[in-house]
Image (cartoon, rainbow, N blue to C red):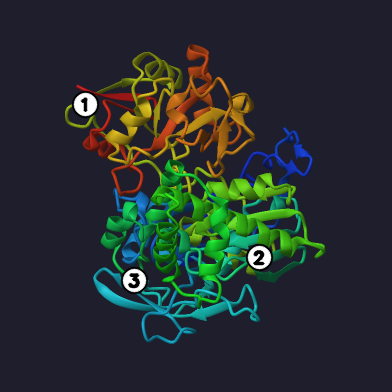
Amino acid sequence: MDRHIRRMATLMARSATVRMPVVGNSRAPQRTSRQGPASHPAAPPPLVERELTHMLICGLKLTHDGGLALIEDGRLLTSVEMEKLHNNKRFQPLDRLEMAEEVLSREGVRADDIDRFVIDGWFPRLRQDPQHPTLRVTHHGRAVELPVAPYLEEPAAEVLARHTFTGLPWADAQGQEYAGYHHSAQHLMGAYATSPFARQGQDALVLVWDGGMTPVLYHVRPEPLHVTRVGELFPLYGSIFADFCAALPPFEAAAAKAGPMRQAMPRNLDVAGKAMAYAALGEDHPELDSVITELLDGRKLSYTMGDYLARALKGHVARQGSGFDDADLIAGFQGYLGRRLLAALTELMTDRGLPPRLCVGGGCALNIKWNSRIRSSGLFEEVWVPPFPNDSGAALGAAVLEWTRISGQPVLDWHVYQGPRLLPAESDPPGWTSRPCDVAALARVLHESGQPVVVLTGRAELGPRALGHRSIFAPAVDPRMKEHLNRIKDREDYRPVAPVCLEHRAGELFLPGTPDPHMLYDHDTRPGWADKVPAVVHLDGTARLQTVNAGESPFVHRLLTAYEALSGIPLLCNTSANHKGHGFFPDVASAAAWGGVTAIWSEDRLYQLA
């Protein structure tokens, strides 16, 4: 009875109306047609109306990029990655279930309030039955072994197969059944259900390519829901690019430190993003494509293919005396994979009657070069990549799968700023003073000081990119700013700094300059602007652009509007606010303890080092 009363009180507080806006984006992203970019609709999305089922679903990702997501009646309440709590290390697993209890408590929820638990599928441990993997976690120091679904579905099996288990350690949940789905399935439905296609009831293709799986294309028909496997694009695991780069001198040390693949933490998780930036030091050489294909053809699919290819290709270019260095090899292999990806998609699309709409999920969807190649090809009218395509969105994807099964509605009401709440600053950090400072005053501080400011506000953004709520902002007009930001963050000097720009001005500064609110594509800097905003221009002349408008990102939009009025520049540098190797700062005290900047802004207060 107590549970029922508490549950109804929670529902009444959260569900004052049955008309809920679909808030993934305030409107669908701009379409890119075969004839070129078209104008995007300005109208907000329609409201959806459905009968509430009073269903609270908790999705859990227990391994690397561990997280917890809460979905209530098709609406995302929150999705929290463990790395964003307590300055945890990046890729932090949810290996202690009391961490989940903490997240639930912050949301005013107890374990026995949850109607359905769902746990993401994973690999079996060594010598474990591949079809019956289990994960080892603890609960207040006590070891718990939880069975989960397999990592992948069998090619001929049901794509969205549901598995059921028992054994959760929470008092009222021990005998309660929990669900499990394949890891590939959560990437698939997490990408589709958050897309504009789901909101509009359209069928779409979903490409899923993650570290431990080959790229597979699926077809989702939403009404009634039917998902089919179109086919595998080619037999290469998504980890091959990181593994290839990790076998070369620029990243060998990082790979050795990461160690061998383990249950919770596969190797080389931190390499792919750095290598994507490092590639700008080299040159893509398409003439290597035939060599790479020949080296890979006929080899058995394995997790050592990247290591093998790096050694073999390095030996080949040395024998040929081509003079290609490691940066050229990294740029060339990244280019090869992008070209092979597009060629395989083109072949599968030919004469198949498939929809010209594509969602992309899995860790490989963080590669902005591959995303941009697909989007600019004209093969699809519209391409959607969620801001959490890697395992940072796995808890959300798992919960979406269960909601979809219950409701038959493969669509999620969500917003990108639904991560953990900012912890309140109860007093000024030692050695710091604070004063009131609204957004307009913050813009003036940035303009007049020319120095970076840590900005912490509201709920954190979902996914691995800092999108303005856990960011370091700085003016981009000083060519030394990128070097300064990389130095205070203890990052390599080749790493880029992203621009965040007013959406309606982006086309003047960048090509294509299309709306990209989640920083998942690259854009060329237009002539004349590279000299005006040099801090955000990468070594190859591109920029990993984030655009903002008033509907999707009201805080950042207000800041940029005020800054533009002072400076005439509609953008700022934007990089993540975090300790090196850790998640976003959870509070002002953490940013102050870091000490990389002399100013922190949070909730209309400016904190300055005394």
The label nearer to you, 1 versus 3, is 3
**Above/below status of 132 relative to 39:** below
423 vs 564, nearest the viewer: 564
* Secondary structure found at label 1: strand
**Label 2 sits on residue:** 217
**Residue lying farthest to the left in this orientation:** 431
Residue 265 place in picture, x, y as percent: 35, 65
Q: Residue at x 57, y 71 (%)?
A: 235
- Crowding around mark 3 (Cα neighbors within 10 Å: few <14, some 14 to 19, many 20+) is few
**Label 1 sits on residue:** 432
**Above/below status of 153 relative to 396:** below
What amino acid type is highlighted by mark number 2?
Leu
**Above/below status of 409 relative to 490:** below
What amino acid type is highlighted by mark number 3?
Arg
Compared across the picture, whether 183 is left or right of 65 comes to right
Q: Residue at x 63, y 74 (%)?
A: 159
**Label 3 sits on residue:** 262
Q: Would residue 410 be visible to someone looking at this image?
A: no
Residue 433 place in picture, x, y as percent: 23, 23
